Image (cartoon, coloured by chain):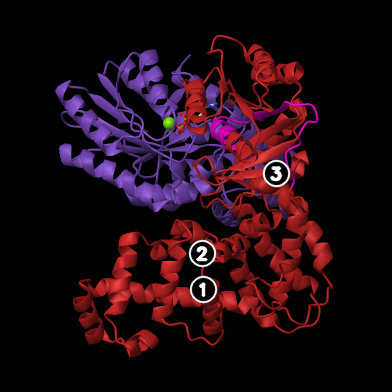
Amino acid sequence: MVFEGLADKLQQTFKKLRGRGKLSETDVNEAMREVRVALLEADVNFKVAKDFIAKVKERAIGQEVLGSLSPAQHVIKIVNDELTALMGGTQSRITVSSRPPTVVMMVGLQGAGKTTTAGKLAKYLVKQNKKPLLVAADIYRPAAIKQLEVLGQQLEVPVFSLGDKESPVVIAKKAMEHAQAYARDFVIIDTAGRLHINEELMGELKAVKQAVKPHEILLVVDAMTGQDAVTVAEAFNKDLGLDGVILTKLDGDARGGAALSVKKVTGCPIKFTGQGEKLDALEPFHPDRMASRILGMGDVLSLIEKAESTIDFEKAQALEKKLRKEEFTLEDFLDQLQQVRKLGPLENILGMLPGMGDLKKLKDVQIDEKQVKRVEAIIQSMTTQERRDPSLLNGSRRKRIALGSGTKVQDVNRLLKQFDDAKKMMKRFQGMSKHKKKGGFKLPFMQ
Amino acid sequence: MGFFDRLKDGLSKTRKGFTEKIEQLITGYATIDEEFLEELEAVLLMADVGVHTTMQLIEDIRGAIKAKKINSPEELRPFLAVRIGKILNEGMVPLARATEGPTVIVVVGVNGVGKTTTIGKLGHYYHDQGNKVLLAAGDTFRAAAIDQLEIWGQRIDVDVICQSEGSDPAAVAYDAVQAAKARKADILIIDTAGRIHTKSNLMEELKKIHRVISREIPEAPHEVLLVLDATTGQNAISQAKLFKEAVNVTGVVLTKLDGTAKGGVVVAIKADLGLPVKWIGVGEGADDLRPFDPAEFAEALFSKN
Ligand SMILES: Nc1nc2c(ncn2[C@@H]2O[C@H](COP(=O)(O)OP(=O)(O)O)[C@@H](O)[C@H]2O)c(=O)[nH]1
Ligand SMILES: [Mg+2]
């Protein structure tokens, strides 16, 4: 089940077609088969994927391939553009009521991440100098109220609760009075997870809605959700009329096709994404990044943005130059490792790279502090010549290096393999960024 | 209600979506043609079976049609039931039990899939069978996770070993194993914090818990159960793979089958990774856990009524 990035697959599919003028129907059909598989593997709903493909096909056939792009790149550009458009061109925000408090209600299936997200949202608002009130209306799950209270303590945000004996409607109403009395300008209601087919519990949410008239009803959706995402979103939307969606658990390797499905059936914008368990791990939604993630092309833009703020800019430019001249050495590799380490957990970063979403490859490159130290020791045990030209490293040299760095020959071998992989990956990067306008590290199809 | 009925009842939603569609398919077509196969492919894909496994099943069907093993749409359902049942059934082993001393079960999975709830249900199941059961609150990370398990302990009348929030989960596991030995418990079920399978530091933490347990009881943990949410799509494969690599998962618990999601990804997980489903969750109550029986599962999926 190894999933290769769509970009890779399309490059392969189109190898023979390089340099042709127009995209023929056969070309496009062949490409769309790959796109379809990519979408399905990303858990985009079957029907949504079908409609999408039909639309893209129509657009792509007969198109002139731009001079600077390969046919594969051109098709990816079209697919990417359409996906981005489908997920709602631009970011959208939370509506703020002109007459506070603004009431936000979190709804969703069990285990989607509502309570944590409520906490994150409170933190997000506090940062903007707002005064949120968290409301514990999950009276069913054991210790759900306590969970919200603990989060409230951590955030120093008040939590309104009446225990688990009062109905959520009563809790919500009283919470509103409380918010008025204490001049809280946001009310965030955490509700119990429920199945969309549970009429009784869906009725309860309707009653809460009726009672406090939320400005924002946000559906919390797990990014790992499969085909059922449409059914769930449709049901919640039908019963409650959603205002937005929050996509959680995007810090894993889920490709997040649910985003597309949910957007398609509800028409609601995705307002935030959850990127981790920490309370500040709430980020705005970027349709363009989500598009490349769904396509398995990695969240290149996020990485670039992150890298730009962390990595030493001059070094990065020097590196880019080296890459272009294919002079990337083990020294640079070490330097890069050390820089990348500053970006945060490495698996997150690597997951953002094209072709790196695949875990099998990722595993080889997964590096912890200890390993970075080991890599350091190994590279430092090499001669300058060896660092510049690893092909010199025959068996006896490798043995010497292992001895010198206090590691095993296998460690040296592994490092060289990693270096090789990195080089390959960068080559691909470079290949794709050849046509970019000046500056930046952008793929040609990303405006 | 007999077991079979209960299973069917729990699965009725799963079965409905899936079999109704197959039923529609079968009654809607006189012969199996390309269009029919395409429709069938859609049914499987929408059940989260996944592209890879679906393609394989369709290939199998094509082969069977060629070999005249399937001659009409009518014969397709039994063929598929047998085929999927076989995938799910292969290499099934009964639930492990320690030859002597406590049987240790560790429950792992990503966030929110239903680990703690499953432990409540599982504890209830073993307790009901007359075992002395002990639970361990190994999720020391999520706010109020310990309280959640303690409430389950009270609910099912079983003791819970715990430390304070933020303490080392391996230390909790150690304490729990000692307590299980001292109190002569038959079953010890250890909860763990939800973790995204790609975070290597958290997976290391899980390995450490595993090591601590094995040091105290060499054959333990006897079962490492991976909880998967039936709502999850293809990412479940990645979860299964990485958890298996880290802690040698012995089986899967498929939760939330009371919803409309089909959980078809377990077929792929079994086919690709050899990980069998052992239990299914069909609700939030203590009784809402069923042993997974592949034959019955496949049967219930495809049975006519
Ligand atoms: N409908 C349904 N909900 C479940 C099932 N199993 C667990 N849940 C719910 O899923 C949510 C998350 O469960 P929890 O046990 O806290 O997940 P954990 O984070 O993996 O420990 C809770 O609201 C549970 O009640 C199930 O089989 N069916
Ligand atoms: Mg838990």
Pick whichever of labels 1 and 3 is earlier in the sequence: 3
Asked if badge 1 and badge 3 are on a common chain, one would say yes
Provide the letter of the chain coloured purple: B
Q: Which residues are magenta?
A: A92-121
Position in image of residue B161 (x %, y %): 28, 24
Task: Say if the magenta span includes residue A144.
Answer: no
Residues at discs 2 and 1 in contact (Cβ within 8 Å)? yes
As helix, strand or loop, the secondary structure at mark 3 comes to: strand
As helix, strand or loop, the secondary structure at mark 1 comes to: helix
* Chain containing mark 2: A
Q: Amino acid at mark 2?
A: Met
Give the numbered dot on residue A270. Answer: 3
* Chain containing mark 3: A
Task: Name the residue: 59% across, 29% down.
Answer: B259
Q: CA distance from mark 3 to mark 2?
A: 25 Å
Whether B248 is drawn above or below A397: the answer is above
Position in image of residue B3 (x %, y %): 44, 20
As helix, strand or loop, the secondary structure at mark 2 comes to: loop
List the residue tagged with mark 2. A356
Q: Amino acid at mark 1?
A: Met
Task: Name the residue: 44% across, 24% down.
Answer: B289
